[in-house]
Amino acid sequence: MSLCVGVTGGIASGKSSVARAFAEHGIPWVDADDVAREVVEPGEPALDEIVARFGPQVLDDDGRLNRRALREIVFQDAGERRWLESVTHPRIRERLVAQLAEMAAGPAPYHLLVSPLLFESGQAALTDRTLVIDVPEALQIARTATRDGVDEAQARAIVAAQMPRTERLARGDDILDNGGDLAALTQRVAELDRYYRQLYRQLANDLPRK
């Protein structure tokens, strides 16, 4: 069994870039955002429940979930947001557990669970260790505005709606500062890769012999 490292960070912190850097070291990963999209694909029970509650206005012309329309509804009503989470979160968790178990049985000494809501959703309980990707808030806002095509005020609101940076940092076991360039990121990931491999060896040595 390999170690599971949970990777999280605020919006535009570079979680996917970090995961790809770990992949260069042969480390597999699953992204909770990808799984969240899978559970609301056409034909999935979760999408049927969402449409039954909110109507066809939350679908696009192809019958897929119109995320923007749904987001406008649930962000205006905390009760509806909680209902949506009650429908999607258990299904997301079930698939994550299955994929993590598959990776744990593989040859890599550790694997990653990449999730923007690692702490908020309780998914940290699925991990052995957590890695927080950290960037200055000003850089987060600039990246979000550029990437999502929103103005600075909207970008600030998105950042403000997430777990505070200080709390996220306090809850992480390890920190990766992603405020620099790609070379700095690559070097830090290499350091963490060596560290996690060492942790795995220590764990393996501590297991009782049969």
Image (cartoon, grey):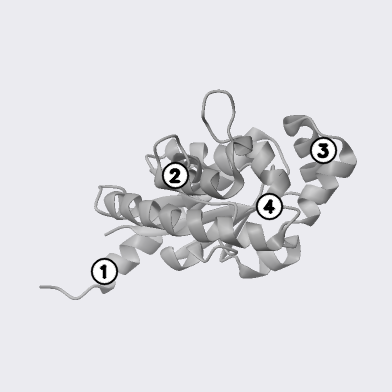
Task: Tell me which residue sits at (42%, 54%) in the image.
Answer: 91
Tell me the distance, in whole angstroms, between the alpha carbons under discs 1 and 2: 39 Å
Q: Is residue 138 at all visible to an observer of this figure?
A: no
**Marks 3 and 4, the one that precedes in the sequence:** 4
* Residue furthest out toward the right: 153
* Residue furthest out toward the left: 210
Q: Is residue 39 at all visible to an observer of this figure?
A: yes
Q: Which residue is mark 3?
A: 142
Label 4 with label 1: CB-CB less than 8 Å: no
**In the picture provided, is 72 more to the left or to the right than 27?**
right
Residue type, numbered disc 4 = Val
Q: Position of residue 156 (x, y in %)?
A: 84, 47
Q: Give the label, 4 or 2, closer to the camera.
A: 4
Task: Tell me which residue sits at (27%, 65%) in the image.
Answer: 204
Q: Give the label, 1 or 2, closer to the camera.
A: 2
Tell me the distance, in whole angstroms, between the alpha carbons under discs 3 and 2: 31 Å
Q: Which residue is mark 1?
A: 205
Residue type, numbered disc 1 = Asn
Q: Which residue is mark 4?
A: 74
**Mark 3 surroundings: few (<14), some (14-19) or many (≥20) residues within 10 A:** some
Tell me the distance, in whole angstroms, between the alpha carbons under discs 4 and 2: 18 Å
Q: Give the label, 3 or 2, closer to the camera.
A: 2
**Marks 4 and 1, the one that precedes in the sequence:** 4
Q: Position of residue 69 (x, y in %)?
A: 68, 38
Under circle 1, the secondary element is helix
**Marks 1 and 3, the one that precedes in the sequence:** 3
Task: Tell me which residue sits at (32%, 68%) in the image.
Answer: 203
**Mark 4 surroundings: few (<14), some (14-19) or many (≥20) residues within 10 A:** some
Q: Which residue is mark 2?
A: 39
Q: Give the label, 3 or 4, closer to the camera.
A: 4
Residue type, numbered disc 3 = Ala
